[in-house]
Image (cartoon, grey):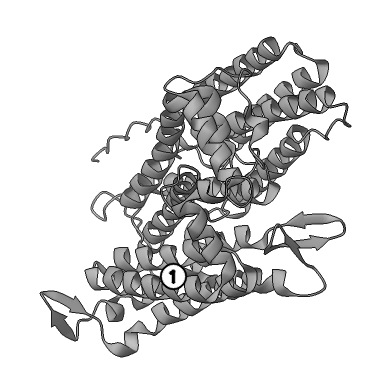
Amino acid sequence: MAFQSVPTRQPTRRTTELLLTVGAWVLGILATLQIGWATGIGMTTEMWITVGIVGLVAVAMHVVIRTRAQYADPILLPVATLLTILGLVMIYRIDVASAQRAERNNAPAPTPDVYAQLTWFAVAAVLFIATLILISDHRRLQRFTYTFGFLGLVGLVLPLTPIVGSTINGATLWVRVFGLSFQPAEASKILLTIFFAGYLVVKRDSLALVRTKVLGVGFPRPKDVGPLLVAWVVSLGVLIFEHDLGTSLLFFGLFVLMLYIATQRRSWLILGAGLFIIGASVAYFAFGHVRVRVDIWWDPWGDANNTGYQLVQSLYGLASGGLFGSGLGQGYPEFVPFANTDFIVAAIGEELGLTGLCAMLLLFAILVERGLRTALAVRDSFGQLLAVGLSIVMALQVFVIIGGVTRLIPLTGLTTPFLSYGGSSLVANWVIIALLIRISDRARRPDVVVPSVDEALTQVVRRV
């Protein structure tokens, strides 16, 4: 009888994940202590409770990964946790600054936002755990490709309904139900990514066909351009009716990039860029809110006390931070309107400097890199496109928001993943991490060794 060697157990690196997660938590504690020391408020009992809750939530997510996705990438959870903790620290810092400013002006103290963000972090952890438990295999999502596509489109248009839709700061992004507000577009970006992945797996062969060549670049058949035109029209509809430049850009950019990756045809990038230029030109000349954004980007100091005030204050804060920053608790982030949401990057740049901003960008780059590495490692085409799409969503968000704050591109209104105050964005981005962890677990899981026919035991059956 031939004996088959038993393969050694593949290391799961869960201990590495736990140590990195604990390290992120310890950094959060040190940052909170620094803020308490620098601002003179010390460390209150409520803050120690908050720190403890953050640690318990992070460990709970690690335990679920250890039991439900033991071969998953060990870097995704610690990096996402560190970014979330950094966001909580900066929101707490802005709360303290706003309270001290109100005290100096004999005004009522504002409601702290850090506790609401902590609550949303707990909700995000629950959905993170639910995603890993309910979705045991990411390939099952492909069965509901068009269902997810329909739900994603419903999420985009839901804020336009007169009963539940709500307009805040000029943008119709919100849905208010039973006193709670959320942005359905955050869920739509996940649903539409799943739809794009499932659709392109089936249609990419026909979309990759070349009819004509221009200057050596092959262009698709006219009938195959239809999906791109549909995505372009939908993105323009979001821009026109909801005044949401960020979601419009994210939605169209995601589809074009996934289309290029699925077909490997540069013509889709050229067509997408052409449609973007046409849409941007039409939007600039036809809609005032787009023209205002572009004018602020072009010359924020032209109306520094009105429309350009927020961006100008942000640039002043980044300039005062310099290379190493003013130090946690020693800047003036409260001078920037909406510093805890759209402009939290400016607060980080002021108190942590260019060095801190580069470190933050490196953390996001690690998340995107691990997502793309997962796409390369997974064996099925749907998983590859889904991992790439989720990574693109995160990369586009970071580029658009940081580009707007630093005046590289016009402001769009997107929030910084994991950092900005807001439950919808935080929950959606943690679901993205859960999906990437599920795909990476499938990619890294060792194959089951099936003995060959010659090595299998033979059973003799007596004929009756």
Residue 166 against residue 316 in the figure, above or below: below
- Percent x, y for residue 281? 42, 73
Of 457 and 450, which appears nearest the observer?
450
Quarter that holds the N terminus: top left
Residue 191 seen from this side: no
Viewer-proximal residue among 55 and 353: 353
Local secondary structure at mark 1: helix
**Picture layout, residue 193 above or below residue 216:** above
Picture coordinates of residue 7, whole percent (x, y): 32, 35
Please name the residue that numbered disc 1 is placed on.
280
Q: Which of 261 and 387 is in front in this view?
A: 261
- Please, is residue 429 above or below residue 152 in the view? above
- Amino acid type at image mark 1: Ala
Residue 348 can be seen in this image: yes
Image quadrant where residue 458 sits: bottom left
Given the current orientation, which residue lies at the most extreme bottom position? 223
Side of 270 where 431 appears, left or right? right
Position of residue 198 measured from the top left corner of the image (x, y, whole percent) = 44, 70
Residue that appears at 66% across and 12% down: 38
Q: Dot 1, crowdedness within 10 Å: few (<14), some or many (≥20)?
A: some
Total numbered labels: 1
Would residue 456 appear left or right of 163 to someone viewing this image? left
- Image quarter of residue 464: bottom left
